Amino acid sequence: MPLYINYPSWIKPEIFPGVPVLGLVRWYGLMYIFAFGTAFFILKKLLAEGALDSRKSDGTLVKATEDDIFSFIATGIVFLLIGARIFSTLVYDTSGDYWRKPWLIFWPFQNGRFTGLAGMSYHGGFIGGLLGMVFWCVRHNRPIMRWIDAMCTAIPLGYTFGRLGNFLNGELYGRITTMPWGMVFPDVPKSELFSSKVEWVAAFMEKIGMEAGNGLVNLPRHPSQLYEAFFEGLVLFLIIWLLHRKKPFDGFSGGLYTVGYGLFRFFIEYFREPDADIGYRFAVDSNAALYTNSSLLNISTGQVLCFLMILGGIGVIVVNYFLDKKRQHT
């Protein structure tokens, strides 16, 4: 009995593969819509709780409205998409094409074929979305940290759909594994296939019950997209949601989200294969293979950024703790 799972052959990146016009609609784009819709739903729940209401300096109550949260999300989405795309093209793309031709960053065609804005970076979206929320709060004279707390309560559940979109696209898969839930993803580049004649590959295949061949084989990998959807999405949402009514001060939920995401993603990166053209940012062995984890000291770009998120989230919590103490004594 094989100790691995074949990626379902009926799953395609396109929702309507082969259908004119509709064939351009992809699962990943639909997941974005679900994500933003979920965030709007959570913010409406917080609105009903009065979590977004505030007071002016003269004590006048300013009640938030549904139009406010729609405008808030819309502004955040625009900044998020801009940040995610810029970060993906200028940080993760190593070809240098986007630095030489920056107008291509938002050009949705490649080689005369419509591809959409293929390539988004979470960390770029995080920075862009943060700037968008701050911009909106300043423009509408609303308490920045209170509104950021609300959005950070809503984001994780929506993020779950984003990673499910990655899974449906068969992208961002993990390193090879002998775990019984390891999955053989389709369309793996030829450079990431292995010769069955190599001794360790033959032993690997025998362990998982994969039939040996004479050519290149596609070994099962961690479904790291699902790990992220579960821990960085569902679990993190439940933690923040259960604590949001008991938060000790504004800024706590935002800091908790930043630390929580950073921690979960940092450890999941050990199961997720780094981009081949970037590799490790820091490694005890510069020639270490990317398809397997040989050392916890081999650190990817994502882990570096997550470590900075953890530090930043701790900083947000500490600073807002002392600001709250100061307000209580004035």
Image (cartoon, grey):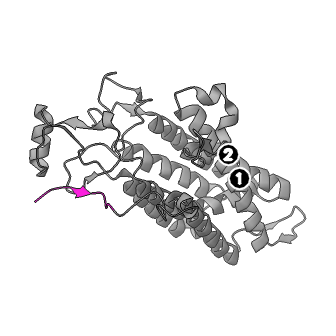
Location of mark 1 (residue): 78
At a point 54% along the width and 44% down the height, the residue shown is 119
At a point 31% along the width and 36% down the height, the residue shown is 190
Counting from the top left corner in percent of width and height, residue 194 is at 22, 36
Location of mark 2 (residue): 82
Residue farthest bottom in this picture: 48
Q: For the N terminus, give its image quadrant.
A: bottom left
Q: For the C terminus, give its image quadrant.
A: bottom right
Residue farthest right in this picture: 58
Write down the region rendered in magenta.
Answer: 1-9
What amino acid is at disc 2?
A: Ile
At a point 58% along the width and 51% down the height, the residue shown is 255
What amino acid is at disc 1?
A: Val
> In the image shown, does 63 or 169 lie closer to the viewer?
169
> In the image shown, does 29 or 143 lie closer to the viewer?
29
Q: Secondary structure at mark 1?
A: helix
Vertical relation: 257 (above or below) 58: above
Counting from the top left corner in percent of width and height, residue 287 is at 31, 22
State the image quarter where residue 25 is shown: bottom right
| Label 2 neighbour load within 10 Å: few <14, some 14-19, many 20+ | many
